[in-house]
């Protein structure tokens, strides 16, 4: 089983970040048949061959995905597509990442 872990900082409010994750989850549910559920600020999702969760905080999205055996061979492509989509979605919502600490 392969694992993908992506963390993206954002400048959205917690409510707006949760709403954006909810929109993504609804689309994934309709297009790929993945089930999802919220537990506090963590959205868990699963379908055959893939499962994971997204934790939403005041300044970041923390996404962990576990790929089954068949999808493990496509890990690089899947990770690239997800990273690109998350970055694109956050940018479209005006969520410019906060500047990195220079200390």
Image: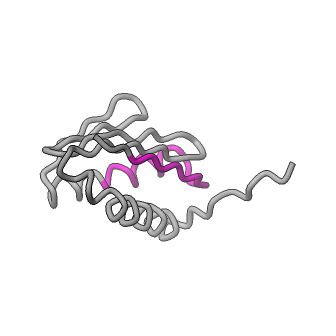
Q: In this view, does 32 lie to the left or right of 11?
A: left
Q: In this view, does 103 lie to the left or right of 44?
A: right
Q: In this view, does 73 lie to the left or right of 33?
A: right
Say which of 83 and 10 sits in front.
83
Say which of 54 and 13 sits in front.
54
Residue sitting at x 20%, y 45%: 69
Up/down of 24 relative to 39, above or below: below
Q: Does the magenta stretch include residue 12?
A: yes
Q: Which range of residues does the magenta coloring cover? A: 4-24
Residue 14 at x, y percent in the picture? 52, 44
Residue sitting at x 27%, y 46%: 67
Say which of 45 and 95 sits in front.
45
Residue 54 at x, y percent in the picture? 40, 42
Residue 48 at x, y percent in the picture? 13, 44
Residue 4 at x, y percent in the picture? 40, 48
Q: Does the magenta stretch include residue 5?
A: yes
Image quarter hosting the N terminus: top left
Residue sitting at x 79%, y 51%: 101
Residue sitting at x 58%, y 42%: 58
Q: Quadrant of residue 55?
A: top left
Q: Count every numbered label the image shows and give the total.
A: 0
Q: In which quarter of the image is residue 28?
A: bottom left
Q: In this view, does 35 lie to the left or right of 23?
A: left
Residue reaching furthest to the right:
103
Up/down of 54 relative to 89, above or below: above
């Amino acid at each position: 089983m392969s694992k993908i872990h992506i963390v993206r900082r954002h400048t959205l409010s917690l409510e707006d970040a949760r709403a954006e994750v909810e929109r993504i989850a609804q689309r994934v549910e309709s297009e790929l048949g993945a089930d999802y559920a919220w537990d506090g600020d963590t959205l868990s999702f699963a379908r055959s061959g893939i499962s994971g969760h997204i934790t939403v905080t005041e300044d970041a999205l923390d996404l962990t995905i576990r790929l089954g055996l068949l999808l493990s061979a496509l890990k690089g492509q899947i990770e690239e597509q997800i990273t690109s989509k998350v970055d694109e979605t956050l940018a479209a919502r005006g969520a410019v990442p906060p500047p990195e600490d220079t200390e």
